[in-house]
Amino acid sequence: MRNKDRLAVLGAGHVGPVIARLAIAAGYPVAIATSGDPDDIALITELVIPGARPRWAGDAIADADIVVLAIPLHRFAELDPGRLAGKIVVDAMNYWPASDGVLTAFEDGGASSRGSSEIVARRLAGSAVVKALNHIGYHELEDRARPAGAPDRRAAGLAGDDPAAVAAVAELTSRLGYDPVRLGGLRAGRVLQPGGPVFGQVLTLPEFERAVHEEARSLR
Ligand SMILES: NC(=O)c1ccc[n+]([C@@H]2O[C@H](COP(=O)([O-])OP(=O)(O)OC[C@H]3O[C@@H](n4cnc5c(N)ncnc54)[C@H](OP(=O)(O)O)[C@@H]3O)[C@@H](O)[C@H]2O)c1
């Protein structure tokens, strides 16, 4: 157990607070940040994410072992890769042109030919990027979370190129309330994206494995 992992959740919109709440319930120390002054989210954090510490993003990242990117992809370019170097980075973001607008970097070569997390990882070359927590809507992510062994526990997929980081994020996924499904390298994480077979689905482990099996294998 990596009990000492400290989390920084970047993003206090829809999904960031859910991830933060589940992580606090699981015993992780959690800092949460937006792009702005932590004082601006202090009261709301106290009310809706009790136990989370609002911080400046840079400070939250500096003290974290795992940084969760729960910000819109069109804001990703604001992040300084240098600050994230050496960290495990959970990419919970999705490329959604309807709300992100068309992002040339993520269209490069065709969205279908390269996964968004592969493009994120290329920019965050000093970080161990793991795609995870992106494919379940925030309401369901909170409502369907169950402890390990619960008969109605659901699955959540993850993918990454760094085995130690994948192990840490698999443990995080499990402690948050989902059976972690390790799909392979970041490339295999394309099945978790919008348009993929599990995006927006909250499936049991066998259902999940059936849904991704063939596609993930061909992307390994
Ligand atoms: N909504 C869901 O159900 C869901 C589920 C899984 C994954 N996702 C993915 O998660 C991402 C976020 O979705 P969302 O619906 O939570 O977005 P959202 O409600 O728009 O919230 C975005 C949050 O990110 C913060 N933010 C923006 N730029 C930032 C930066 N540079 N540094 C730190 N914080 C920053 C925003 O605060 P400021 O603007 O004040 O900085 C805001 O708190 C998207 O890529 C989405 O596809 C969403």
Image (cartoon, rainbow, N blue to C red):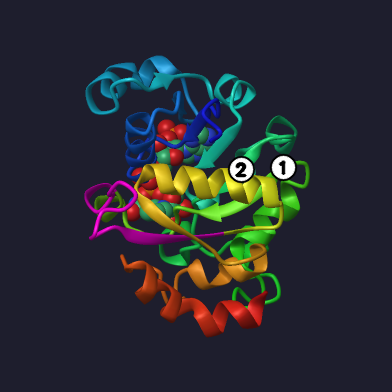
Seen from the viewer's position, the closer of residues 64 and 46 is 64
Of mark 1 and mark 2, the one earlier in the sequence is 2
Q: Amino acid at mark 1?
A: Ser
Seen from the viewer's position, the closer of residues 98 and 16 is 16
* Residue 164 location (% of width, % of height): 68, 46
Seen from the viewer's position, the closer of residues 89 and 37 is 89
Question: Few, some or many C-alpha atoms within 10 Å of disc 1 (few <14, some 14-19, many ≥20)?
Answer: many
Q: Which residue is mark 2?
A: 89
Q: Is residue 70 visible?
A: no
Q: Amino acid at mark 2?
A: Val
Determine whether 208 is above or below 177 in the image. below
Image quadrant containing the C terminus = bottom right
Where are the magenta residues, as a range? 142-158
- Report if residue 34 lies within the magenta region: no
Seen from the viewer's position, the closer of residues 73 and 172 is 172
Is 80 left or right of 43, judged from the image as shown? right
Q: Which residue is mark 1?
A: 127
* Residue 29 location (% of width, % of height): 45, 23
Check contact, mark 1 vs mark 2: CB within 8 A.
yes
Q: Which mark is residue 44?
A: none
Question: Few, some or many C-alpha atoms within 10 Å of disc 2 (few <14, some 14-19, many ≥20)?
Answer: many
Residue 63, by quadrant, is top right
